[in-house]
């Protein structure tokens, strides 16, 4: 008779997996895309030309590059909630800046 070691009923999930990690990754994708668009509109409103929008696009690209240099990937799997909240605050500030420029 052979002895088979007992296997766990459910294998342990690695850190950063599950629905919470998926929601944070999706929110990051939405916020980075939205933030780049708002930066383009801020540039357009500030310089009142397409060149301002182009500069906003360049600034958004540098922002995404900076985000990648901090987290290792643009959309990391195990992202902290603090990072998503900071990204949300940055987007709110950019929208408020746009509203102040328009009025």
Image (tube, rainbow, N blue to C red):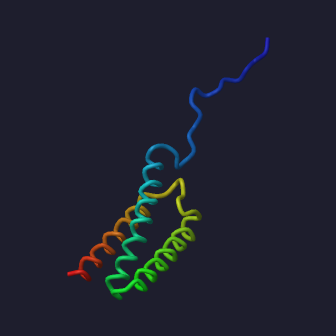
Residue 24: x and y, percent?
44, 54
Q: Quadrant of residue 4?
A: top right
Quadrant location of the N terminus? top right
Looking at the image, residue 71 sits to the left or right of residue 38; the answer is right
Up the image or down, 8 lies above or below 31; here it is above
Work out which residue is located at the far front of the displayed protein and give it.
50
31 sits left or right of 72 in the view: left
Q: Quadrant of the C terminus?
A: bottom left
* Count of residue discs: 0
Q: Is residue 92 shown above or below 80?
A: below
- In the displayed structure, 65 sits above or below 26; it is below
Horizontal placement of 43 versus 74: left or right?
left
Q: Position of residue 94 (x, y in %)?
A: 33, 75
Q: Residue at x 46, y 77 (%)?
A: 57
Q: Residue at x 38, y 82 (%)?
A: 43
Q: Residue at x 36, y 72 (%)?
A: 38
Q: Position of residue 98 (x, y in %)?
A: 29, 77
* Image x and y of residue 85, in percent: 37, 63
């Amino acid at each position: 008779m052979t002895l088979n070691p007992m296997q766990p009923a459910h294998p342990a999930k690695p850190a950063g997996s599950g629905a919470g990690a998926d929601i944070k990754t999706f929110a990051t994708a939405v916020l980075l895309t939205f933030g780049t668009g708002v930066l383009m509109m801020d540039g357009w409103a500030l310089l009142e030309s397409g060149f301002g929008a182009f500069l906003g696009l360049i600034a958004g690209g540098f922002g995404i590059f900076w985000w990648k240099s901090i987290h290792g990937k643009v959309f990391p799997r195990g992202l902290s909630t603090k990072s998503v909240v900071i990204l949300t605050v940055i987007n709110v500030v950019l929208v408020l800046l746009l509203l102040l420029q328009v009025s």
